């Protein structure tokens, strides 16, 4: 599994080689922005507010000062084309934040929402014994991430190894009083999932 530091290193590497296709540059920039806005704003000497927002101008200045210059137009393009819509711009377009996935301490302020009866979680089969014992835990992120679409869960799980998809009885959890949140990019978040609410693959 590629850890975050490794992903960030590869983002930095593709940045510095230069001369690559624009798409490659945009994807490296997107990974780098993800790294900064979720995990390491300090890497470019900036801070996020409590809700994870930063002024776009401040972000771009930090990127520039750390050798990763990016124009406003490039940033807008990344936000608009990010396949998972990872970034959210404020309504006035002056601030930006990552939609989810933070490890830095932020409160995204999403309103609790009613999930569908079943959500999916893709993982690797080597984690199943541990998940059977502990349920789903959030690890270094702020929440466990769940999806409505099986295909999304499959893609998420394959990142970790041999795919295993769990079904989560989210309707029952919700009726039992467990809060769920939905991000603007359609990811469902919850604090943890106890084993009794998990349906394991055969
Ligand atoms: C596993 C991507 C052992 C969990 C996706 C997962 C997602 C356990 C891994 C978002 C466990 C954590 C999040 C337990 C959970 N024992 N392993 N008790 N409980 N795990 O990357 O859900 O590309 O932090 O199954 O689209 O894979 O970042 O979480 O395999 O929405 O925009 O521990 O990341 O979005 O891995 O992915 P991650 P995730 P982005």
Image (cartoon, rainbow, N blue to C red):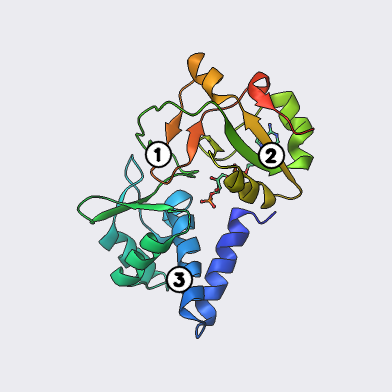
Q: Earlier in the sequence, mark 3 or mark 2?
A: 3
Q: CA distance from mark 2 to mark 1?
A: 29 Å
Q: Residue at x 57, y 40 (%)?
A: 140
In the image, 77 versus 201, the foreground residue is 201
Can you give x and y, in whole percent of width and height, for residue 33 in the image?
44, 60
Name the image quarter holding the C terminus: top right
If you read the primary sequence from the N terminus, does the residue marked by circle 2 or circle 1 appear first? 1
Front-lying residue, 186 or 27: 186
Q: Which mark is residue 165?
A: 2
Query: Crowding at label 2, few (<14), some or many (≥20) Cα neighbours within 10 Å?
Result: many
Tell me the crowding category of disc 1: few under 14, some 14 to 19, or many 20 or more residues within 10 angstroms, Cα based. Answer: some
Please determine whether, in this image, residue 117 is positioned above or below residue 45.
above
Ligand 1 shows up in which quadrant of the image?
top right
Residue 154's disc is none
Toward the bottom, the furthest residue is 19
> Residue 116: horizontal and vertical position, in percent?
49, 29
SS for callout 2: strand
Write the residue at 68% across / 51% down: 158
Residue 168: quadrant of the picture: top right
Circle count: 3
Residues tagged 2 and 1 counted as in contact (Cβ below 8 A)? no
Q: Residues within 10 Å of mark 3 (few under 14, many from 20)?
A: some
Question: From the image, which quarter does the N terminus lie in?
Answer: bottom right
Q: Secondary structure at mark 3?
A: helix
Which residue carries the number 1 mark? 106
Question: Which residue is at 74% across, 27% downward?
Answer: 132
Is disc 1 placed on a helix, strand or loop? loop
| Residue matched to label 3 | 26
Q: Earlier in the sequence, mark 3 or mark 1?
A: 3
């Amino acid at each position: 599994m590629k850890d975050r530091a490794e992903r960030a290193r590869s983002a930095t590497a593709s940045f510095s080689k230069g001369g690559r296709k624009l798409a490659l540059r945009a994807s490296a920039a997107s990974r780098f922005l993800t790294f900064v806005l979720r995990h390491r704003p300090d890497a470019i000497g900036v801070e996020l507010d409590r809700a994870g927002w930063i002024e776009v101008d401040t972000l771009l200045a930090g990127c520039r000062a750390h050798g990763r210059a990016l124009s406003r137009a490039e940033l807008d393009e990344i936000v608009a084309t990010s396949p998972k819509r990872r970034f959210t711009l404020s309504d006035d377009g002056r601030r930006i934040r990552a939609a989810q996935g933070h490890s830095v301490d932020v409160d995204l302020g999403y309103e609790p929402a009613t999930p569908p009866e079943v959500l999916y979680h893709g993982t690797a089969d080597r984690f199943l014994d541990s998940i059977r014992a502990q349920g789903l835990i959030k690890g270094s992120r702020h929440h466990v991430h769940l999806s409505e679409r099986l295909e999304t869960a499959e893609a998420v799980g394959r990142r970790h190894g041999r795919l295993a998809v769990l079904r989560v009885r989210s309707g029952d959890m919700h009726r039992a009083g467990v809060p769920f949140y939905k991000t603007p990019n359609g990811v469902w978040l919850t604090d943890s999932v106890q084993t009794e609410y998990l349906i394991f693959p055969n």
